[in-house]
Amino acid sequence: TDNRELMTRVADELLERETLDRDEFAALIRGSKPEAPEKPDSGDTTVVDASHPEAPGSSKLEPGLA
């Protein structure tokens, strides 16, 4: 039954976060709650402008030739 309780804690944490790294998993095994993941700063976003034409000399592949 101890393993069942551990499995339930791991499953609940995975439902909340979707992924666990090694340290977070080890914390669950020890019985403590892993720390909340760090949220990225909103100022670190990169915007890609799709309106730029392709680089000179590059060619697009035609359908059926790839």
Image (cartoon, grey):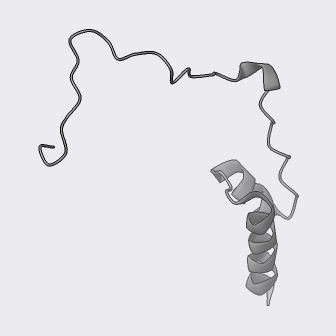
Q: Quadrant of residue 62?
A: top left
Left or right side of 22 for 10: right
Instruction: Name the residue at the left extreme.
Output: 65
| Extreme residue in the bottom direction | 1
Specify whether 47 is left or right of 14: left
Q: In which image quadrant can residue 13 be found?
A: bottom right
The image quarter containing residue 41 is top right
| Quadrant of the drawing holding the C terminus | top left
Q: Residue at x 80, y 36 (%)?
A: 38
Q: Measuring 74% from the left and 82% from the top, which residue is drawn there?
A: 3
Q: Residue furthest top?
A: 56
Which x, y percent locates residue 22? 64, 52
Q: Is residue 53 above or below residue 30?
A: above
Q: Position of residue 17 (x, y in %)?
A: 76, 57
Answer with left or right where residue 3 lies relative to residue 62. Answer: right
Residue sitting at 70 percent across and 49 percent down? 23
Query: In front here: 7 or 39?
Result: 39
Quarter in which the N terminus is drawn = bottom right
Please count the marks in the image: 0
Q: Residue 2 at what x, y percent from top left?
A: 80, 84
State left or right for residue 18 relative to residue 62.
right
Residue sitting at x 78%, y 76% = 6
Residue 15: percent from left, percent from top: 76, 68
User: In this orientation, which residue lies closer to the viewer: 35 or 42?
Assistant: 42
Q: 18 and 59: which one is in front?
A: 59
